[in-house]
Image: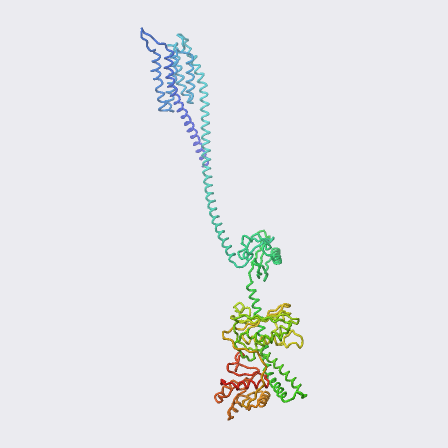
Amino acid sequence: MEAINTDHERSRAQQFRVTEIFNGHQQNICRSTDRMFAILMALQWVAGIIAAYWLSPLTWAGTTSQTHLHIWAAIFLGGAISSLPIALALAQPGRTSTRYAVATGQMLMGALLIHLTGGRIETHFHVFGSLAFLSFYRDWRVLVPATLIVAADHFLRGVFWPQSVYGVLAASEWRWLEHAGWVLFEDTFLLIAIRRSISEMWNIAGRTAESENLNEELERRVTERTAELESANQELEKEVAERRITEAELDKQRAFLRQVIDLNPNFIFAKDREGHYTLVNQATAEAYGTSVEGLMGKTDADFNPNKEEVEWFRLNDLEVMDTLKEKFIPEEVFTDASGRVRWLQTIKRPIVSLDGTVDQMLGVATDITSRKQAEEALHRSEEQLRQAQKMEAVGKLAGGVAHDFNNLLTVINGHSALALRRLKQDDPLYRKLEAINEAGERAASLTRQLLAFSRKQIMQPKVLDLNHVIFETNKMLQRLIGEDIDLLIGLTPDLGKVKADPGQIEQVLMNLSVNARDAMPKGGKLTIETQNVYLDESYASRHVTARPGRYVMLAVSDTGCGMDAATQERIFEPFFTTKGVGRGTGLGLSTVYGIVKQSGGNIWVYSEVGRGTTFKIYLPCVDTPAEEFKASTDEDKAPLGTETVLLVEDEEMVRNMTREILLASGYQVLEAQHGSEALLVAGQHNGPIHLMLSDVVMPQMSGRELAEQLSPIRREMKVLYMSGYTDDAIVHHGVLDEGMAFIEKPFTPTALICKLREVLNMTAEIQA
């Protein structure tokens, strides 16, 4: 119902609008027609005056001429007829009264013109033209007064003044009907035209109203659509703004993620099936010596010259993508842009797309080069530590054996030497005893080497200049190695000083030279060099037993056969030798090792099979000036004596043999088998005791403790210690305390007597 009412209201409004448009259109026509007639009637007025003047003859009265009455009629009567319509047309155009006034005035003006022209037939066409012009109003009612005026004019003037309307003095009384008929005939066609014109005007008004309605509807729809578009545009702008915010957030997230992966020190990368990088971080790009952009789209083969590595990476990548399984690679090598080989620990995973296919893989590789190097360094350190512990254990065993063996050798060598003194050389027993003595000396040499290796040998260190030691032993070394080997010596000037036993340094030089000689059976070059060096923390970290600091390096190099790695691991072990049977004891290098270690130094070997060997010895540098050094010489002839000697020795065989030597050399002997007995013997002896010859290691009381107890009561007594193996009684870390006299077991009778006389001849009192 509401829809019907709405349609009815729309129809009424539509009809009202049509009428309004029609009336407005007609009003506009009337106004324009009024203005047209205002101009037309003014022109007709002027034309009437002209026509009156041209067509009306002048009238004369006597000698004075007068203006014809028609002229005055044209002027005043025409003015009266035209003035009101013209005024209304100009002042009130479009009004109904104006139209009727115009119609009346126009037709009256036409009648005047017909009259002024004397009823000429041409002027009657003015009537038809006037009616035609009046039809411009599209108002048939305007034609009614106009037609009535024409009819009345023709009737009245046709009856009373026919010449003014028909141009004749007499006319039929019904002639006016003829003219009226023509007028009605024209009116008929004009009315039809007006009706059609009005109908057309209504149609135009309807179409205009409909067009306006359509325009309004269109405008409404346009407005609605515009509103919708504006709303949509606002939504779109909002969406665009939100999208921009989202894109900004995404850009921020992408930048953050890029920063995260670039800050990650691990290699993060992704590759496709062709091996092209689709994602890399800064660490990966830097490893290949390029930028992230420079690596994108490239393959490993474009940067890595190692084809085996590239193929290895490629196989692993394809395996991950084909099997859809993660792969963990504990260790793999990678050559970076600088050519350095690095160790990586890598995990690779397939990247599965939305459709379930795998065309890419993700890899994360951790550079474990430092860890690998640390593990290798730790392994080397552990090997060095195990080797050092093994050498220490062997050394302890060797030292223990040498101690007991030295006591036996002292007896054997002493008695054989005493027996040889009593026999003549042509005696059948002489050569046998000589062989026993030589064997004993060789055995004594072996025990000394064992003690040297075990670092239980007694050192009498001095501050030395190694250059001077090498210079003094040069001739002896040249004789030792033979003529087919060139001895080259390179000594560094201003070489630092070291503190070591000069005899032991001689032993080191001889053992290394002999070892080099045996490695060059066909000749070669033996090079001895010295140099000041500083071992830093890095070097010390790679060598367990080394400590940072200043050192003097002694290097002995040969051009011999060299050694493999397995041999190098065992060369310092006692009794290990690569020489044939009977050509070596296997104690030469172990002796060198023990002497160097006992001197606070380190020794390292560098060797390659077929290229030779270099031994480098590092001895700590000291700032004390060097003492005078002389090369070893043969022992002098044993001197005789008459002084009283207190002999203290717990080993009976050694004590008896020593007593015999002393007695044979003229000395008075007081003997005791341990410290307590020595105190008793010394207390009971009334005469002077010039020297106490005591073993160092004894039960109940050591030789040092015995000397300390006897010193207050026997201030004139000097002390000579003897031992083949010593604890810290008189030796600290293998170094003899200053002021202590010592002779090493096993000793010969001559050596003992010479040392005894040396101590007795000392003018300074020995401090116990």
Asked whether 732 or 341 is in front, the reply is 732
- The location of residue 78, given as percent across then percent down, is 35, 16
Does residue 50 appear left or right of residue 553 in this picture? left
Point out residue 740 in the picture as x, y percentages from the top left corner: 52, 83
Residue 600 image-quadrant placement:
bottom right
As drawn, 427 above or below 565: below
Q: Residue furthest top?
A: 62
Task: Name the image colouring.
Answer: rainbow
**In the visual, does 245 lie left or right of 751?**
left
Q: Position of residue 634 (x, y in %)?
A: 59, 81
Looking at the picture, how far across and down is residue 335, in whole percent? 58, 59
- Foreground pick, 27 / 732: 732
Count how many numbered circles sit on residues in the image: 0
Q: Nearer the viewer, residue 72 or 682?
A: 682
Q: Is residue 698 above or below residue 617?
A: below
Q: Would residue 701 be seen by someone viewing this image from the given angle?
A: no
Q: Can residue 63 be seen in this view?
A: yes
Would you say 613 lies left or right of 191 here?
right
Give the quarter of the image for residue 163.
Answer: top left
